[in-house]
Each structure stands twice: as C-alpha cells, then as structure tokens.
Image (cartoon, helix red, strand yellow):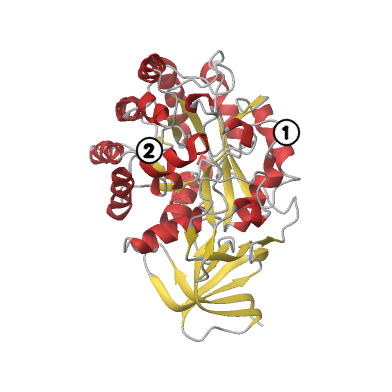
Amino acid sequence: MDFDLVLQGTVVLPDRILEQGYVAVRDREIAEVGLGVPPAARERHLLGKALILPGAIDAQVHSLSQKDQEDFIWSTRSAAAGGVTTIVDMPYDEGNLVCSAAAVQRKVDHAGPQARVDFALYGTIDPEEGPARIAEMVEAGVAAFKFSTFGTDPKRFPRIPPALLDACFAAIAPTGLTAGVHNEDDEAVRTYMEQVKASGITDWRAHGLSRPAITELLAMHTIFETGANTGCPSHVVHCSLGRGYDIARAYRRDGFAATVECCIHYLTLDEENDVKRLGGKAKINPPIRPRAEVERLWRKVAEGDVWLVSTDHVSWSENRKTNPDMLANASGVPGLEVMMPLFVKGAIERGIPLTWAAKLMAENPAKHFRLDHIKGALTPGKDADITVLEPRERVYDAAASGNNVVGWSPYNGIRLPWTVSATYLRGEKIAEGGKVLAEPGTGRFVRPLPRQVIAGAAA
C-alpha cells in the first residue's frame, strides 16, 4: 500500500476548506491532500463531518515559571490533548533565565526526556550583559527572542529599557529572527498601580484600573519604532486592544515587519463577567478587557490583522491565584488543552471562516519561528502533525480531563461544541478522545533553518 495513514473528513487549510477531503501520510510526512474517494492505507479513518487541521503551534508557553510545578511533562501532555503538536517555550524560567547558549542547551536537555510534543525555544538577555550572547543563542537554536518593556522581576522577568532594546534589536536584525516584546509601559503601569492602591480598590476591578489601555499602546509604539529603527522584525506577543492591531497595520503599511499576537483569553473572556466572577484566576498581563473589546478583536481576526493566536499558557498553583487582593495574584492562566476548541467555537459563532484556525495557529507560527520547512501545514513533505476535532459537545473541566497539573482553569464551565478527538505527531497518534498516548521523550527540539541555508536555497 502507498500510504501509512489516511484521514477523511472536512480538511481545513489556510486558504480553503475541502468538504469530504482527505490527508494521506507516508513515512511520518504529509504525502497527499485530496478530494473524493480516499486512497487505501495501512490505517484508514473515514471521519464524516470531523474537522482535520494542521497540528497547532502554540507560540507562547511558560512550562517552567514556577519551580516544581508544571514542567514539560505536564505542559506537553495538555498540548497533546488539545491538538497542539509544537510548543514554543518562553525564556523566563524560575532559576534559569535562558540568556546564553549554555542555558539553551540546559533547557533542551531538561525538556527532551519529558516532552510529549515537539518544542522550540525563545531566548532573552540578562540586562547586565546586554546583547553580547545573542549570536551564540542563535547558534544554539532559539527560534526567536523575547524582551519586556515592563519589569515583573529584576532577574527573572526584567524590564529592557529603550536604548538596550534598540541594541538588542540591532543585534538580532542580521539573523532574520524576530524580536518579541511584552507590551506594557513600565513607568505608566507603576503610576497607575500606585493610584489604584491609594484609592483602596483591591477587588477584581483593581487589575484593569492599574493597566489601562494607554499602558499597552505606549509600549507598542516603542516596540515598533525600535523595529523600524533597526530593521529587525518586531512582534508584540499579546495585545488585548483593537487599537493595537491598527498601530501594527500602520507600520506594515509603511514597509516595516510589525506583527501582533492575540491570546485565546482575549478572544474568550471579558472583564465585566469573567474577571468579576473569577478574580485572581483571570488575572493576566495585559488585562482581560470589556466584552466590546473582545468582539473588536474577533473583527481584527476576520480582517487579517492578527498574525498569531496563542495561549500564553502558565499553570500557577491555585494558592498563587486566589488572593482576595487582586494585585497580589500571579499573572497568567493555563490554556493549552482548549485553545483550538475555543477558537473554533468563537469563529463559528461569529461566522468567521475556519481557515483562520489553520493560518493563525499553524501556518503563521511556523513562518514566524522559521520552522515552516517542517511544520505548520498539511503540505507534502512536512511533518504529519494533524489535529482532528469532532462535533461532540462537552463542558470543559480541567480537573476531570486529567491532562493538567492544576485542576483550575478560567475556561471551566464553558460549553465547547467541538472536541479534539485525535492528535498526530509526525504521523503517530499521540492523543485520542482526551487520553494522551505519547510517552515522555516522544517530542523533539525543533529549530529554525540557519540563515545561510535559507539564503542558499533562495539563490
């Protein structure tokens, strides 16, 4: 037989949808995508109305933010269950800021034996060292760099001031990699925070008041102008405001590489209902905004102004998310297990084509991190990373699934009309019906093609 695996159903591609389409796999790679009668294979599944999508690439995961908590053993398990076949892990690990080639290698060695899905890595800098180690981290295989205009912690999550940010962007520019930045203006946030503390407001309202829209938008101008000044592709790793996507579009119109990522929480949760109800369990930086802003972001998806959709996943232990003083809670939420079903639900409810799911969670992330030689599309020759969603309704419960290190989620109780029924990594089934089949060590470290290889291929 020609093929190892054939799946037939509704094949969702970035530019079109194939009703009664099929995907055929040979030697762990996509071999053929077609319409009509599916060919014979050693394993063949006729999946009816099920959606067949490229495996998702989550552009923003924090597996090691809290020592002895989640780690790759759990983050990649949640990923496999949720149809995410590659995670890109952030460099702000408690006890190991990923700011040197040695730190990159330490993390690869640590993650490799645990990972159930493939993983790529971000690098960053120690502000005291500046950009000196950027070249060695590129050599070590990082897929992008991450900085912050806001300092959460001087050592683990430091603020990178404007002149240093400019120097880092200038060092990254020749490599062709992207500089991703957390977009909150440090001085503005600290001023508004003091105002909120002085007002005595400590409940759910405090977080949004301490980080109003202007704190995000000021930082975005700094980030994109730094990219324009250095010729470095500049990327905002999360934006909660429609206005932010307009700013990025204006820079692109002027010829600069300026992109924005939207996290699934900004497309799902709102301040007046969810933050009010969940308190610290919905505390995220930048904050969850009002429902009107959520709908504005979906319009930005439909208009093509969103470049990536990610989770910014972090599984804080419950005691770090339940302080009645809103500002005292850790920031961030888990989401790997439900990103794809939540996006599909939101898009269908608003009449937005599901082609955006394939583009924003697979094709564009693969391009963004220069992994598109092997990842991100149901295209012959690429890794057979495939996600299947079936029209089976369920109410999400993070604890009941057994695939999360924590039993809480801001998405608990949400009714999901589509469920991830199977996930394939390089043609091997790694999850089925919510049960993760992949053993630790199944996943691999994936890295961008070196710049000269790309240049040579282009020539």
Q: As shown in the figure, which amino acid type bears the numbered disc 1? A: Asp
Q: Nearer the viewer, residue 305 or 99?
A: 305
Q: Is residue 459 visible?
A: no
Q: Position of residue 223 (x, y in %)?
A: 36, 28
Q: Secondary structure at mark 2?
A: loop
Q: Earlier in the sequence, mark 1 or mark 2?
A: 1
Q: Residues within 10 Å of mark 2 (few under 14, many from 20)?
A: many
Q: Position of residue 81 (x, y in %)?
A: 62, 57
- Residue with the most extreme bottom position: 37
Taking the spot 75% from the left edge, 55% from the top edge, the residue there is 439
Q: Is residue 6 visible?
A: yes
Q: Position of residue 130 (x, y in %)?
A: 52, 17
Q: As shown in the figure, which amino acid type bears the numbered disc 2? A: Cys
> Considering only vertical position in the picture, is 64 above or below 458?
above
Q: Residues within 10 Å of mark 1 (few under 14, many from 20)?
A: few
> Considering only vertical position in the picture, is 93 above or below 255?
above
Taking the spot 68% from the left edge, 43% from the top edge, the residue there is 72
Say which quarter of the image contains residue 259. Answer: top left
Q: Nearer the viewer, residue 271 or 115?
A: 271
Q: CA distance from mark 1 to mark 2?
A: 30 Å
Q: Secondary structure at mark 1?
A: loop
In this rendering, would 126 be left or right of 349? right
In this rendering, would 163 be left or right of 144? left
Q: Nearer the viewer, residue 137 or 265?
A: 265
User: How many marks overall?
Assistant: 2
Query: Circle 2 sits on which residue?
Result: 239
In this rendering, would 322 be left or right of 244? right
Query: Circle 1 sits on which residue?
Result: 68
Q: Nearer the viewer, residue 93 or 166?
A: 93
